[in-house]
Amino acid sequence: NKDGSLAKKPWIILGFLALGAVGAETGRRMLIPDQSSPEADVESLQVKAVQTPTPPALPPEIFTKEAQIRQLFGVKKFDEALRLIDSEVQTNQSKPAYQSYIDWLKRQRFVVRTAQAFVFLEKQNCSAAMTILEEIPEADRPAVALKGMGYCKFLTREWSDADTLLTRYLQVQSQDHESIQMLARTKEAKGEFEEAIQLTESLQNIEDKESAELQMEPLRKSLLAKQTESLNQLVRAGSFFTLYYQPNVSPDYLDRVVETLEKTAAKLKSAYGIDYPEKSIDIFFHDMVLFGEITHGPEWSAGLYDGQIRIPIEDGENFTENVARAIRHELTHAFLSEMVGRRNLPTWFQEGFAQLAECEQLCTQYEYAATTQKFMPAEKFEQSFLNLPMREAQVAYKQSLYMVLLLVHHQPDANIRQMFILMPGLESLNSQELVASTSWSFTLLHQTAKNTWENQISLKSIRPQN
């Protein structure tokens, strides 16, 4: 598997919910968000009756304003909801009889701000989301904010902070199987395998048995396999990477690995301006059998990047060009992921570009003509190729490379380098915004690729632009 996005793993996808307004002394209802899950609808809310104290006599317009706030919240007009809340506080704060209403308004402000942060989290824009969440006083943060913050700390590999935040969240939402799995991964990253396995086994106690059981067994097997490997694991640190391997891996093999890594990083920097990551990239060389248990990837997998690079290696295997290509491919995934703060990139782009980098001098020569296979619809290029049958996956990869090469052939080098420079600052990393940072659009790129592919035009016949 060459799918390079950690965040597409099912245990890391947050169920982004609108947070219900916490109705209080107005004697109305309290809206409580449904338990978050990868499948949860952003609009999903459970409505539960709550016994509240008898409210003071308040004029009807107060209930009208409350209804307006709830309505704006429900349609995600968060800025308007905040303006109305602030206006109501300003208008009524000097009226003692309205104190319960003012208190309710202030609480809603924190709920709405948290919902705003989750809009950014949907795009994996943790920088913007954390700015909002950290502005909310700790005592006033809705519980789900802890999950969002823990997710961001997980992405940036700040393991201790992720551990603390997710643990605190689970003390309130103990049935959130997604957060249990994320915390288990955090414990694993800290080397606390026993704790990670215990967390995984606790999924058996989740009320949502079906979802929990689907996640439990693969995660448990993966953790047990990693724990087994860790017992004899050796470590070698490099300038921007750390290698983890077993004693049967030869020094010569490791030297060739290091040489390949350093040359690939230098090529990505010189050709496209992609800089070295701030944090060391972890690279694991797994026993062939344990690799399958750890990754649960398809049989055709030659390597994987899931936040760490994982390469299968047979006992006594010599370093070959196929191994070098897998390393170049997965290192490119890692560099792209680190460059954008581990946010998702469209599958076609990350897979196409990783294939481009597989050759020592970049695989810019498309030696074969297009096949009679139809070109995939645009939306399919955004989706993971993980679960495709081998033949379909081969076509998806080939067409992704075809699109990347078309982009490189038709755009001046300066435009491609600018695309990588602008990429980390994009609010959304979808295909349209990505390609728009050159002089093309994704719609035009896909249509051009479709036409040339289905007319069986080889890229060898297309002249690169200067």
Image: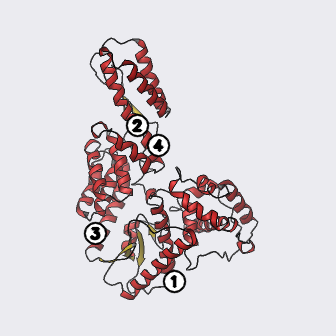
Separation of marks 2 and 1 at Cα, in angstroms? 52 Å
Q: Secondary structure at mark 4?
A: helix
Earlier residue among tags 2 and 3:
2
- Give how far across and how far down residue 268 sits, in percent: 53, 72
Q: Considering depth in this image, is 254 or 181 the residue closer to the camera?
A: 254
Which residue bears the numbered disc 1? 321
Separation of marks 2 and 4 at Cα, in angstroms? 10 Å
Separation of marks 2 and 3 at Cα, in angstroms? 41 Å
Which residue bears the numbered disc 2? 113
Residue type, numbered disc 4: Val
Which residue bears the numbered disc 4? 119
Q: Is residue 429 visible?
A: yes
Earlier residue among tags 4 and 1:
4
Q: Secondary structure at mark 1?
A: helix
Which residue bears the numbered disc 3? 227
- Quadrant occupied by the C terminus: bottom right
Is 145 on the left-hand or right-hand side of 461? left
* Other-residue count near label 1 (Cα within 10 Å), few / some / many at <14 / 14–19 / ≥20: few
Identified at 27% across, 55% down, the residue is: 199
Image-quadrant location for residue 375 = bottom right
Residue type, numbered disc 1: Glu
Above or below: residue 456 compared with residue 130: below
Q: Considering depth in this image, is 216 or 110 the residue closer to the camera?
A: 110
